[in-house]
Image (tube, rainbow, N blue to C red):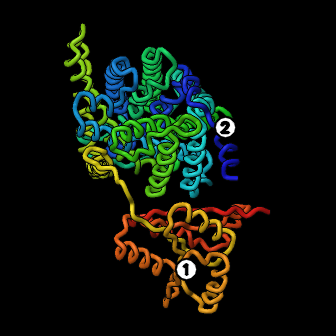
């Protein structure tokens, strides 16, 4: 039944040779890898305004120069990542670039920053999408956390079906959002030019609570830089593109940057022209759309498209988090289960881990977008800085034609990213950025502890200096609760393993023990039956004490514990029986020199 459900939800398994058919065209890749960056248009302008409005509505005019500065930074980083995409056609994320050019610890810092960022991307995107939904339907606001977790579960399931299927599902909402935003910007500019529409009405005009200082402007700039999150996604996912991978990835990166810059500056400009002021319970995009398009179908189209792109922006992380986790796990800094491809040629364990961690984050922060965003961009710009610094070293080592020019471009990207990182960490430190600043070193230490464990395992399993054992002294112990067909089969099998077989019965009832002794003489008189007393009615502890005593007193190398088990015709019938064999397996798992074998006897209807 479990396999049938798995096939129903995930589809049939795909052969390894089918992986080439799972690659993405530029059109689908734009939807998969750009939804995170493009969706930031829905909240980046609002984050700028939320800071500037602290100095009163007169300070909101600074949103346009701040947006232009962020646009220039976007342009610089796009050129930098275009170079990275072509230099690393097998995937050039910050982890790989830092590993090859800066060393192990910088790569682990980059990996920790990116993994943290991808988890936060899912949480922020889903929370923002739910905010867009609750702006249109305020009655859903109390249920925002449950709604967010349900949406994460939906996206997780879609990604477990495979990258090509997820791209088919998510492509349409991405392009609907792009059409909606360009339509909103064009309509807003035309109406303002022709009719000079006045500012949007504000129920309670905000009162200035802070002076307009350089620090406040830097806070607004740092908040708006959330528009740049997701920029590295294409560089991380180059192998997912159709051939030629680097060229297709580079073209997609340029299109993404052009669309993002146009929409971000356009929405910010419209917000200034129409005097949009942040309001509780309604996003800036919602206010803008309602004022420009009215409260009819076009407004709900924009809100629906915004909600969909914000929810599906999480898909960028689902494409990159499992792949990055597999790279780190391949280097033995994360559990090796993350390396394995699942039935549908995706890193299923990484996808599930991402869904669980993002859901926990949503619950912990009560689905509040503004509480999550201060945690968001520290990891992004740290990875930008390390990636571009690594590219500078890459060009210096390669020294191909024009290497100095390329190194200068990446150096400028590294410097600008580092400046923004410093600004963000400073102005957002008390608002939650300190959590990520502390978390990243802790993750690096965790990576190192995992790596030390794998080194320990390799050292203990290596054949160097190992002498093959010529003889192993052991006995076979068969725990029994009665004598029936399953026990008889297990004892017969035990005799093929060793000539020294002992059955062990834990006495919980004197009458039952006496009856078993009588029946034992009839069926297995050739195998000794050891009856253990249990004054405290425990089955496990007397058995463990007996195994330890036999191994110690007889100086055995191994003790084989052979467990008779019967298997019921239906899985649910197992719940009607004691799981003693399972408890024994668990108790013996960490005992040195003890081998556990199960001998199943299938009950047939």
Where on the picture, by quarter, is residue 559?
bottom left
Count of labels shown?
Answer: 2
Above or below 53: residue 589: below
Q: Position of residue 281 (x, y in %)?
A: 52, 49
Q: Position of residue 343 (x, y in %)?
A: 58, 39
Residue 125 in view (yes/no): yes
Q: Residue furthest top?
A: 401
* Image quarter of residue 76: top left
Q: Residue placed at 22% from the left, 34% from the top?
A: 103
The answer to which of 456 and 400 lies nearer the viewer is 456
Query: What is the CA distance from the residue labelled 2 to the residue labelled 1?
Result: 50 Å
Q: Which residue is mark 1?
A: 529
- Residue 298: x %, y % from top left: 65, 32
Residue placed under numbered mark 2 in the picture? 12
- Residue beneath the point at 19% across and 18% down: 396
Pair 2/1: label in front: 1
Q: Quadrant of the C terminus?
A: bottom right
Q: Secondary structure at mark 2?
A: loop
């Amino acid at each position: 039944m479990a396999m049938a459900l798995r096939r129903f939800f995930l589809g049939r398994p795909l052969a390894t040779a089918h992986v080439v058919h799972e690659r993405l065209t530029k059109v689908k890749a734009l939807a998969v890898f750009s939804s995170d960056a493009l969706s930031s248009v829905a909240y980046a302008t609002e984050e700028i305004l939320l800071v500037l409005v602290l100095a009163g509505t007169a300070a909101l005019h600074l949103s346009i120069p701040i947006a232009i500065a962020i646009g220039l930074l976007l342009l610089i980083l796009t050129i930098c990542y275009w170079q990275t995409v072509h230099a690393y056609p097998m995937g050039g994320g910050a982890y790989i670039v830092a590993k090859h050019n800066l060393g192990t610890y910088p790569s682990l810092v980059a990996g920790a920053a990116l993994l943290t960022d991808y988890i936060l991307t899912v949480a922020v995107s889903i929370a923002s999408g739910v905010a867009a939904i609750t702006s249109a339907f305020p009655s859903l606001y109390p249920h925002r956390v449950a709604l967010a977790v349900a949406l994460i579960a939906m996206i997780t399931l879609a990604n477990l079906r495979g990258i090509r299927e997820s791209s088919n599902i998510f492509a349409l909402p991405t392009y609907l959002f792009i059409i909606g935003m360009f339509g909103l910007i064009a309509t807003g500019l035309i109406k303002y030019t022709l009719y000079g529409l006045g500012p949007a009405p504000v129920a309670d005009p905000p009162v200035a609570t802070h002076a307009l200082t350089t620090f406040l402007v830097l806070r607004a700039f740092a908040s708006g830089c959330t528009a740049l999150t997701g920029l590295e996604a294409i560089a991380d996912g180059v192998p997912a593109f159709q051939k030629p991978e680097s060229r297709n990835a580079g073209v997609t990166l340029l299109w993404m940057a052009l669309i993002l810059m146009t929409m971000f500056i356009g929405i910010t400009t419209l917000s200034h022209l129409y005097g949009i002021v942040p309001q509780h319970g309604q996003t800036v995009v919602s206010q803008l759309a309602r004022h420009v398009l009215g409260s009819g179908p076009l407004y709900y189209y924009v809100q629906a498209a915004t909600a969909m792109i914000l929810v599906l922006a999480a898909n960028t992380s689902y494409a990159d988090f499992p792949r990055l986790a597999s790279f780190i796990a391949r280097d033995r800094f994360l559990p090796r289960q993350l390396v394995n491809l699942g039935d549908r040629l995706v890193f299923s364990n990484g996808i599930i881990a991402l869904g669980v961690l993002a859901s926990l984050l949503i619950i912990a922060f009560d689905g509040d977008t503004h509480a999550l965003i201060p945690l968001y961009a520290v990891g992004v710009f740290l990875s930008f800085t390390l990636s571009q610094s690594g590219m500078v070293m890459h060009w210096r080592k390669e020294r191909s034609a024009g290497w100095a020019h390329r190194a200068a471009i990446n150096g400028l990207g590294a410097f600008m990213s580092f400046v923004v990182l410093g600004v963000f960490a400073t102005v957002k430190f008390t608002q939650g950025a300190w959590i990520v600043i502390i978390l990243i070193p802790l993750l690096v230490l965790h990576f190192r502890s995992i790596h030390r464990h794998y080194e320990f395992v390799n050292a203990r399993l290596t054949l160097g200096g190992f002498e093959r054992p010529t003889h192993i002294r052991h006995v076979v112990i068969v725990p029994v609760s009665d004598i029936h067909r399953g026990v008889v089969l297990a004892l017969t099998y035990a005799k093929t393993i060793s000539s020294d077989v002992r059955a062990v019965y834990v006495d919980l009832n004197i009458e039952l023990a006496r009856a078993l002794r009588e029946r034992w003489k009839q069926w297995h008189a050739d195998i000794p039956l050891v009856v253990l007393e249990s004054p405290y009615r425990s089955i496990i502890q007397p058995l463990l004490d007996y195994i330890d005593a036999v191994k110690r007193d007889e100086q055995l190398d191994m003790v084989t514990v052979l467990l008779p088990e019967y298997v019921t015709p239906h899985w649910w019938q197992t719940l009607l029986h004691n799981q003693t064999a399972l408890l024994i397996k668990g108790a013996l798992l960490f005992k040195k020199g003890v081998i556990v074998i199960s001998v199943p006897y299938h009950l047939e209807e």
